[in-house]
Image: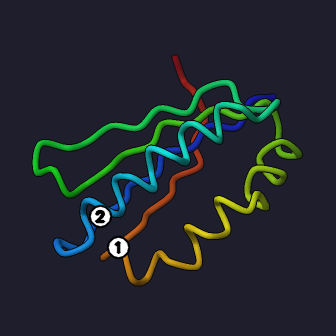
Amino acid sequence: MSIYLTAIVKSKKETLAELRTMLLDMVVNSRRERACIQYDLHEAADKDTFIFQEEWEDQAGLDLHNNQLYLLDFVAQANRLTDEIVIYKTEKLA
């Protein structure tokens, strides 16, 4: 059963370019993972908010994703780069 996530990442003004580069790199790496069905990154009109739309094959695939070195690196730097991160695990209705 697919796992759906929406992640909202709010950048600090002074780290916007660095964060954008890191997030785009996460897209490239995540899409290479076997369990990744969808991994799209959107930028809000305010240019400092990023939104991920993700779909994973199953919980095991998501767990593996969450332990990738590039994602762990992002988590380690998140406090320095972001003002806020909100992640929603959702169920597809239609």
Q: Position of residue 92 (x, y in %)?
A: 58, 27
The part of the image, by quadrant, that contains residue 14 is: bottom left
Q: Is residue 7 above or below residue 85?
A: above
Assess disc 1: are there few (<14), some (14-19) or many (≥20) residues with their C-alpha within 10 Å of its C-alpha: some
Q: On the image, numbered disc 2 is attached to which residue?
A: 10
In the picture, the disc for residue 94 is: none
Foreground of the two, 92 or 52: 52
Q: Position of residue 18 (x, y in %)?
A: 34, 63
Residue at 32% across, 50% down? 50
- The colour scheme used to paint the residues is rainbow
User: In this rendering, would 33 be left or right of 51?
Assistant: right
Q: Secondary structure at mark 2?
A: strand
Whole-percent x, y for residue 17 in the image: 26, 59
Mark 1–mark 2 Cα distance, whole angstroms, equals 6 Å
The residue at the point 12 percent across, 42 percent down is 45
Label 1 belongs to which residue?
Answer: 82
User: Which percent across, then down, holds residue 93?
Assistant: 54, 24
Q: Are marks 1 and 2 in contact (CB under 8 Å)?
A: yes
Q: Residue at x 62, y 70 (%)?
A: 73
The kind of secondary structure element at disc 1 is: strand
Point 81% across, 28% down: residue: 1
Q: Quadrant of residue 22?
A: bottom left
Q: Amino acid at mark 1?
A: Thr
Indicate the amino acid at tag 2: Lys
Position above or below: 88 against 78: above
Image-quadrant location for residue 10:
bottom left
First in sequence, mark 1 or 2: give its number. 2
Q: Residue furthest top?
A: 94
Near-viewer residue (8 or 68): 68
Give the farthest residue toward the left: 46
**Badge 2 density bin: few <14, some 14–19, many ≥20, Cα 10 Å:** many
Kindly give the residue lying farthest to the right in the view shown: 60
